[in-house]
C-alpha cells in the first residue's frame, strides 16, 4: 500500500502531497522528500501528533534527514511487527550522517 502511495509522487503534473495514515503509513511520511513530495505533515513535538502515524518535526529533520533526502538516497530498514520500538533507525541513521553516507534507515511494519 505504501509503495502505491509513494509512486504517486513520481513525476506528478503539479506539486503533490501523498501520504498514508497510521503506523503502516509512517514510511510514506519519512520518505516523502526522497520521492519528490511537496511536503509532509509532522507533529510539533513527540506525542503531540494530530493524526495517526505522524512523526515529530524533530525526528524528520534530524533522525531521518528529511531535507537532505534526494532521489539518490538509499533506503534501508528494519522489518517487523511491532517495529516502532526499535532503536535501529537511531543507530543506523546516526552512523550514516556521521560518515556522510546518503542513506536513510526506516522502520517497516509488516
Image: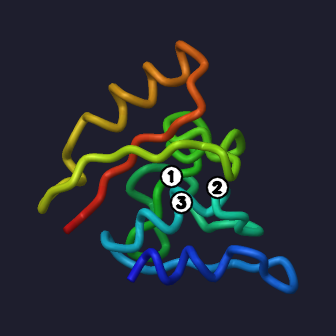
Q: Is residue 38 above or below residue 67?
A: below
Residue 68, position in %: x, y? 70, 39
SS at mark 3 in the image: loop
| For marks 3 and 1 on the same chain, the one whose residue lies earlier in the sequence | 3
| For marks 2 and 3 on the same chain, the one whose residue lies earlier in the sequence | 2
Q: Which of the labelled discs sits on residue 56, or is there none?
A: 1
Residue 65, position in %: x, y? 60, 39
Q: Which of the labelled discs sits on residue 7, or is there none?
A: none
Q: Are marks 2 and 3 in contact (CB under 8 Å)?
A: no
Quadrant of res 39? bottom right
How crowded pointer 3 is (Cα within 10 Å; few <14, some 14-19, many 20+) is rated as some
Residue 34, position in %: x, y? 64, 55
- Seen at 43% across and 19% down, the residue is 95
SS at mark 1 in the image: loop
- Seen at 45% across and 75% down, the residue is 3
- Please name the residue that numbered disc 3 is placed on: 43
Q: CA distance from mark 2 to mark 3?
A: 20 Å
Q: Is residue 25 above or below residue 8?
A: above
- Please name the residue that numbered disc 2 is placed on: 34
Q: CA distance from mark 2 to mark 1?
A: 18 Å
Q: Nearer the viewer, mark 2 or mark 3?
A: 2
Query: Image quadrant for the C terminus?
Result: bottom left
Q: Is residue 16 left or right of residue 30?
A: right
Q: Is residue 74 left or right of residue 81?
A: right
Amino acid at each position: 500500500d505504501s509503495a502505491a502511495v509513494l509512486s504517486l509522487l513520481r513525476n506528478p503534473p503539479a506539486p503533490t502531497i501523498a501520504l498514508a495514515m497510521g503506523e503502516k503509513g509512517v514510511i510514506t511520511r519519512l520518505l516523502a522528500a526522497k520521492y519528490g513530495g511537496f511536503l509532509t505533515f509532522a507533529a510539533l513535538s513527540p506525542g503531540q501528533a494530530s493524526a495517526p502515524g505522524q512523526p515529530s518535526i524533530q525526528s524528520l529533520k534530524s533522525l531521518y534527514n528529511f531535507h537532505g533526502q534526494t532521489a539518490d538516497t538509499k533506503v534501508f530498514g528494519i522489518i517487523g511487527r511491532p517495529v516502532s520500538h526499535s532503536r535501529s533507525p537511531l543507530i543506523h541513521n546516526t552512523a550514516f550522517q556521521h560518515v556522510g553516507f546518503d542513506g536513510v534507515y526506516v522502520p517497516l511494519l509488516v
